[in-house]
Image: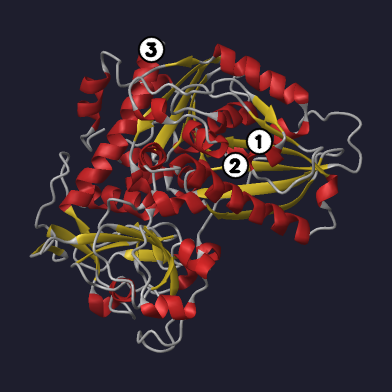
Amino acid sequence: MPAIVVVFEPSGLRVAVVSGTTVLEAAREVGLHISSECGGRGTCGKCRVIAQPASAPSLQDLEHLSTKEVEDRIRLACKLKIVENTRILIPGNEAFVKILTKTDSKEWALDSGLQNQFGIAVDLGTTTIVAYLLDLATGVQIAQVQSLNPQTAYGEDVMSRITYASREKDGARTLQQSVVSGLNQLLTKLLDTTEVTVDQLTRISIVGNTAMHHLLLAADINSLGLAPYQPSIVGPTTMNPQEIGFQTTNSSELYLPPNIAGFVGGDTVGFILSQRLDLVDDVIIGIDIGTNGEIVLSDQGNLYCCSAAAGPSFEGATILHGMRGQTGAIEYLSISDKDDRPDISVIGEDSPRGLCGSAIIDLVAELHNAGIIDNTGRMHMRSKRVIDDEKHGRSYVVVKSDESMESNRILFTQKDVRQVQLAKAAIQAGFRVLLDTVGKDVSEVNRVLLAGAFGNYIRPESASAIGLLPRTEISQVIPVGNAAGEGAKGLLLSKKSRNLAERIVANVKYVELASHKKFQDVFLDSISLLQ
């Protein structure tokens, strides 16, 4: 019987099950805890999850859930049978997701006359949202909150959400309402934890990639899903946030910076602005590694950028036992003896349940260094921990079932290696094409700036070893925290920063990789692990 894939959020853990398996059974297979006091008999009503898609409610659903909860796709996990590929959000787990909030704080220009006024700067990511509350008169940050982007219930990458918005009736509106609801919850948390009132909240600035920008505004998204992937909104947007459902006053203002291209948006603008890449006097590569890796090259202040379609492998998706960075995820790994259990570090010091992106990069680098995988990525039987698994093929056993308190066996398969190779090849090809555009070689790169969560949590040594980063001195690989979020703060605090960002965007040269004459050859060459 064909397997059906269930993806659990916010962890990103996935499992293949046969049709008719309940969500509760599937969760147990991957070691996820869903409260079920009655043991799955449907009598306690505690095992509530949000399903996408959601089947017709069962009798037990109707007994324990309100009409609104049923309409919001909430179901009892013990009675929800999986009959097609399904995404399941386990409510209440967001706090356990490791979300990057730290920014490399800058001194920003301030507008005058804003005493006793406050604003919220938002980094609206595909996977996570971070919001910062600032005093507009002083520029001082007062509080910050973060959460999973609720749109993940409709797809973990931008293309799946673009497809949902385009094909589903009222799809764009549904996604807009989903994210605005999440933003309103963050807004409420910020105000509840401070003495700031909603009447004092006069500004909101939001940065995000072009798809997140369009979905927030319920703008026409169709052109982003088809070549040449043009945004329907390019310039900056200033509006009353109430127009799209924010719970603010009539006097408040929402600002979104311009987009650069179809897959390079305001988050990259925030990155460039916060690091002032337009003013540098050397050669810098800036990379925000994600499902779509945004890459910026500054050649003595001349700016070039591209978007590399890395896919979701670095976030744990498409990897057999991959997951997001939350409790139970292996985040770092090293191999001292190829036949012994690898040394691992687990988030929350919990029993290991899967591999997050930083550990996945470590693992490929360590397996290659140990000779278990060769330069082509092929896995060899050169370790007692390499097996030919009946179901998953050749695999390296990261954790054996008797090495985990919860008996969770964690494999890293030959297919997983290939997924990482393709993802890293997309990033490497991106920065190589940008360098070729300005007649530079990788050896001429002076600094590499890593933005975003993945870039700040990976080991630069491992990333460089497999060619994910330009080969340079490790000391010159610099994590810059949530650079997009820091840029959002600048855009919040002054019109001077907004004008500067708009001038920067006008001078950035965008390189479309898909149509570049050298991209295919460079991409194929970049798949090799010999760099």
SS state under label 3 = helix
Residue for point 64% across, 19% down: 502
Which residue does the numbered mark 2 point to in the structure image? 123
**226, 322: nearer the viewer:** 226
Residue 234, x across and y down, in percent: 54, 21
Circle nearer the N terminus (3, 2): 2
Can I make out residue 482 in this image? Answer: yes
Amino acid identity at mark 2: Asp
* Location of residue 148 with respect to 449 vertically, above or below: below
Q: Quote the CA–CA distance across marks 1 and 3.
A: 29 Å
The first of marks 1 and 3 along the sequence is 3
For the residue marked with disc 1, what is the amino acid?
Ala
**Callout 3, which amino acid?**
Thr
Q: According to the image, label 1 marks what residue? A: 488
Q: Secondary structure at mark 2?
A: strand
Residue 396 tag number: none
Kindly identify which residue carries mark 3: 437
